[in-house]
């Protein structure tokens, strides 16, 4: 290399060394892994009915596959059962707790026992067995909660009855007729015991206007604790 070429190379190296380094660009935040607020959702619910139900008018199917201890359990998502407490603003926020066994969109409807059934004993008028639906009114929502250990009277509605259409335990807007409200006791932050009041077991058959003596007893267990 000539002396002139050597000088040019040396000058280029000096200029390169004197340049300021390029600024490091800050990395973009990882939005994919950033914590996201969880959406509000209603808890699901399981319903347990005592197997010793000779004195009760609302009875389970007694299937061994769904027996836990001394109870017959209708668990949400198992064999087509859907149970929920409308305790948040995700849906109605009504506070009602519902059980249905024949919802077309329910999961696990391919089990041999689907749809699971309940029985209602109408005394001298016989026993009806079918896909009865249960709605215990206003046990928990964002504006109201039964405190643990407290018992309150609530309306209970049993629907989808071939005989009655709807059986109502509590006031009904049909000519002043009424049944007896049930007693709901909050056992824990996630459990409610529903039973007839002592000496008050009247239930109104809406289709006929007839009143039956129908004792009930079951437990609702939410999928998570509630305030």
Image (tube, grey):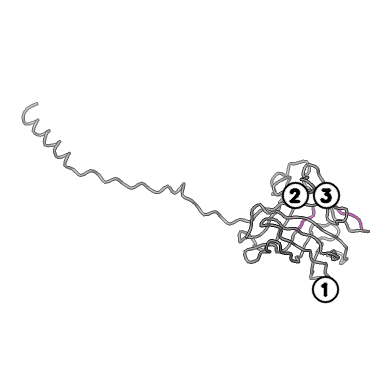
Quarter of image, res 114: top right
Q: Which residue is drawn at 84% across and 71% down?
A: 177
Quarter of image, res 84: bottom right
Total numbered labels: 3
Label 1, on which residue?
176
Residue 74's disc is 2
Is 214 colored magenta in this rendering?
no
Image position, residue 204 (x, y; %):
84, 65
**Alpha carbon separation for disc pair 2 and 3:** 13 Å
Q: Which residue is drawn at 83% across and 56% down?
A: 58
SS at mark 1 in the image: loop
Relative vertical location of residue 5 with respect to residue 58 in this rendering, above or below: above
Is 133 colored magenta in this rendering?
yes
**Alpha carbon separation for disc pair 1 and 3:** 35 Å
Would residue 37 be found to the left or right of residue 190 on screen? left
Image position, residue 72 (x, y; %):
79, 48
Q: Which of marks 2 and 1 is in front?
A: 2
SS at mark 3 in the image: loop
Label 3, on which residue?
51
Q: Residue furthest top?
A: 1
**Alpha carbon separation for disc pair 2 and 1:** 34 Å
How many C-alpha atoms fall within 10 Å of the one at disc 1: few (<14), some, or many (≥20)? few
């Amino acid at each position: 290399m000539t002396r002139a070429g050597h000088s040019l190379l040396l000058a280029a190296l000096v200029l390169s060394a004197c340049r300021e380094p390029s600024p490091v660009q800050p990395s973009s935040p990882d939005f994919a892994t950033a914590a996201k607020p969880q959406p509000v959702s209603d808890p699901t619910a399981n319903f347990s009915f005592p197997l010793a139900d000779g004195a009760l008018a609302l009875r389970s199917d007694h299937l061994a596959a769904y027996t836990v201890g001394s109870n017959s359990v209708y668990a949400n998502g198992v064999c087509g059962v859907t149970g929920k407490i409308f305790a948040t603003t995700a849906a109605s926020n009504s506070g009602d707790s519902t059980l249905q066994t024949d919802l077309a969109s329910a999961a696990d409807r391919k089990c041999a026992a689907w749809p699971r059934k309940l029985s209602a004993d109408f005394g001298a008028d016989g026993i009806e067995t079918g896909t009865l639906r249960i709605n215990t009114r206003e046990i928990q929502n964002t504006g109201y909660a039964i405190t643990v250990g407290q018992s309150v009277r609530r309306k209970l509605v049993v629907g989808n009855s071939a005989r009655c259409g709807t059986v109502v335990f509590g006031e009904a807007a049909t000519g002043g007729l009424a049944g007896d409200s049930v007693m709901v006791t909050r056992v824990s932050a996630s459990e409610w015991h529903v039973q007839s009041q002592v000496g008050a077991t009247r239930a109104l058959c809406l289709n006929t206007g007839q009143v039956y003596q129908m004792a009930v007893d079951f437990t609702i267990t939410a999928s998570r604790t509630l305030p």
